[in-house]
C-alpha cells in the first residue's frame, strides 16, 4: 500500500511548481517486522534568475571548483554586485564554495536573454580573484560572444581586468 503525500510547497518567483513529493511505502514481509521506507523526490525548478542562494556551476578548471562539482556541492550565490540584485550575463557575484567565499563572473544563464544572447542549460560561472583574473587556466564550455563587449566595458569602468576571462575561453557562441 503506498500513499502520496504532498509536502513543502515552495515556489520560485517566476514559476509555480511543486517542490517535494514524499512517497511512503509500507509493506509486510514474512519473518520481519513491519518495514516502512520513505523516499523523497525533489521537483523544485531551479530559479532561472540568479538571486541569493541560486545554485551555480563552475565551468573553469580551478582546483576549488573541480572539487566542489565532483563532490556534488555546487557553489551558491551569496550576493550579486549590481543595483537590481538579479544577476545577468557578465555580472560579478559572490559565491559560497567549499566553506569559502569567492567571486565569480556569470558566463551563461538559464533565464531568457536579450536578442542574440544564447540561453544555457545551467547557470555557469568562472571563479576570479579580487583583481579580476581567473583562478583557472581554461574554460570548458562555450561562452557568448557578446560577453566580449560587456566585459570590456566593465574593465574600463571598474579598473579590474576582466578581459583575462576571455583569454582563457576556447570556444565562443
Image: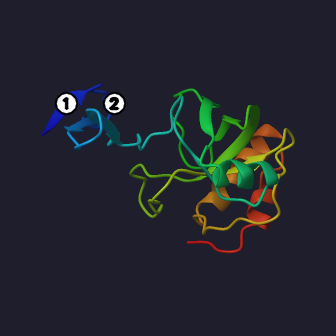
Q: Residue at x 77, y 66 (%)?
A: 138
Q: Is residue 160 above or below residue 51?
A: below
Give the image location of residue 142, x and y in percent.
Answer: 60, 69
Give the image location of residue 131, x and y in percent.
Answer: 87, 42
**Left or right, 27 with reference to 62:** left
Q: Is residue 171 above or below residue 162?
A: below
In the rendered structure, find residue 165 and report the number of the disc placed on it. none
Mark closer to the chain start, 2 or 1: 1
Q: Nearer the viewer, residue 73 or 121?
A: 73
Give the image location of residue 80, x and y in percent.
Answer: 61, 32
Q: Nearer the viewer, mark 2 or mark 1?
A: 1
Quick one: quadrant of the C terminus? bottom right
Asked if the residue under mark 1 is in contact with the one under mark 2, i.e. CB atoms within 8 Å, the reply is no
Q: Nearer the viewer, residue 92 or 122?
A: 122
Q: Is residue 66 above or below residue 171?
A: above
**Left or right, 113 with reference to 78:** left
Q: Residue at x 22, y 43 (%)?
A: 30
Q: Is residue 152 visible?
A: no
Circle 2 crowding by C-alpha within 10 Å: few under 14, some 14–19, many from 20: few
Mark 2 highlights which residue? 13
Q: Residue furthest right?
A: 131
Q: Name the element at disc 2.
A: loop
**Left or right, 168 with reference to 35:** right
Distance Cα–Cα, label 2 vs label 1: 24 Å
Q: Is residue 118 above or below residue 35?
A: below
Q: Residue furthest left?
A: 1
Mark 1 highlights which residue? 5
Quick one: quadrant of the N terminus? top left
Amino acid at each position: 500500500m503506498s500513499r502520496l503525500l504532498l509536502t513543502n510547497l515552495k515556489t520560485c518567483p517566476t514559476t509555480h511548481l511543486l517542490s517535494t513529493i514524499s512517497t511512503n511505502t509500507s509493506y509486510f514481509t514474512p519473518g520481519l517486522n513491519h518495514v516502512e521506507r520513505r523516499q523523497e523526490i525533489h521537483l523544485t525548478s531551479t530559479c532561472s534568475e540568479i538571486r541569493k542562494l541560486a545554485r551555480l556551476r563552475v565551468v573553469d578548471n580551478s582546483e576549488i571548483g573541480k572539487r566542489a562539482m565532483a563532490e556534488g556541492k555546487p557553489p551558491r550565490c551569496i550576493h550579486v554586485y549590481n543595483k537590481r540584485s538579479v544577476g545577468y550575463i557578465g555580472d560579478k557575484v559572490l559565491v559560497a564554495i567549499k566553506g569559502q567565499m569567492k567571486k565569480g563572473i556569470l558566463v551563461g544563464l538559464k533565464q531568457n536573454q536579450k536578442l542574440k544572447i544564447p540561453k544555457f542549460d545551467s547557470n555557469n560561472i568562472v571563479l576570479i580573484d579580487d583583481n579580476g583574473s581567473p583562478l583557472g587556466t581554461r574554460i570548458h564550455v562555450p561562452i557568448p560572444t557578446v560577453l566580449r563587449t560587456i566585459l570590456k566595458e566593465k574593465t574600463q569602468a571598474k579598473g579590474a581586468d576582466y578581459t583575462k576571462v576571455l583569454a582563457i575561453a576556447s570556444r565562443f557562441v
